[in-house]
Image (tube, rainbow, N blue to C red):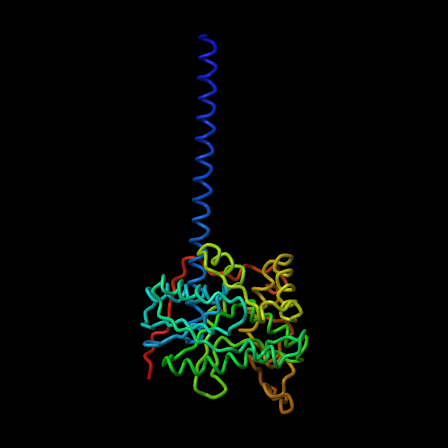
Amino acid sequence: MDEIAQMNALNDSVVTDDSAAAAAARKAEERKAAHEINKLSKRLHRQVGEAITDFHMIEEGDRVMVCLSGGKDSYGLLDILIGLQQRAPVRFSVVAVNLDQKQPGFPAHILPQYLQSRGVEFHIENQDTYSIVKRLIPEGNTMCSLCSRLRRGILYRVADDLKATKIALGHHRDDFLGTVFLNLFFGGRLKGMPPKLVSDDGRHTVIRPLAYVAEKDLERWAEHRQFPIIPCSLCGSQENLQRVQMKQMLREWDQKYPGRIDNMHRAFAHVVPSHLMDRKLYPFTTIRPTGVADPAGDHAFDEDEDESCATPASAALPEEAPVQFMTRQRS
């Protein structure tokens, strides 16, 4: 009996040790996950703050209308701007706007419930653009051109009604690069997606605060924050879109060649018109040798050529970099 008791005690000790080890491993995993989420949060808020500062997107007293579709990008944009309201050196307000296009199966209750739970001012605009698009666009054709024009016109009117000074869209870094390649491959022009623009009627300023943010980071943030994602049954459901192919291409490059996407994105902030072929941007027809050295002239070798041929370093800045906004007063 003593031997049996000793064996039982030994087994209990082993089980206790295993349980303690498993609990310690779980705690270590939880600490690691919390650390990674903290890094992600800092990176997202820093990158949005940098974009706002670099392109002077938000100023003192601005009323920012955030266009909320129910997708991960617009949810992330709204969430980050709400967070930055508490930290920014300028005061600005946020109003979320959703355009209910009356597509079949759209869960109209989700966004109001979410926005009420966050205490965010919001407006739901009901416009049956879905039936207009379906009636005018032949079956099998992409709907984006007409759909986006209808949305823009409605949202500009809503911005006037709400007295919004800025209209914020949820396009991110990968959307910008996808647009570049769409125009390059199919449009014959070097054109991306501007981080800030004035509407064609000259009355509204449109901003894209996620201009520096990677889509994969927004996906992780949406999963962490558990946003109630609403699938799109319009443009997002069209598998034959060229934009979908561009997205797949960029994802493949990001997996195979780390750093390539960062370098391409950074390149569009460092454009050298004299080394392109657009005669409207550079006076090729009138340049002549002057016999005087020109620091902006062509060099046999660029100063950073060795760096450009090397393995690209990460474009990320230190995680601790503070968020800063423009502080210039509105006129």
Q: Looking at the image, which residue is at 56% across and 73% down?
A: 268
Residue sitting at the far bottom:
286
- Foreground pick, 6 / 270: 6
Residue 75: percent from the left, percent from the top?
Answer: 45, 64
Residue 43: percent from the left, percent from the top?
Answer: 45, 60
Residue 220 sits above or below residue 48 on the image: above
Residue 189: percent from the left, percent from the top?
Answer: 64, 80
Quadrant of the rendered structure where residue 113 is? bottom left
Count of residue discs = 0
Quadrant of the rendered structure where residue 6 is? top left
Residue 205 sits above or below residue 253 on the image: below
Q: Quadrant of the C terminus?
A: bottom left
Q: Quadrant of the N terminus?
A: top left
242 sits left or right of 113 in the view: right
Quadrant of the rendered structure where residue 23 is? top left
176 sits left or right of 277 in the view: left
Residue 139: percent from the left, percent from the top?
Answer: 67, 75
259 sits left or right of 31 in the view: right
Residue 14 sits above or below residue 196 on the image: above
Q: Looking at the image, which residue is at 51% across and 67% down?
A: 106
Q: Looking at the image, which residue is at 58% across and 82% down?
A: 293
- Foreground pick, 104 / 34: 104
Q: Looking at the image, which residue is at 56% across and 67% down?
A: 174
- Foreground pick, 316 / 24: 24
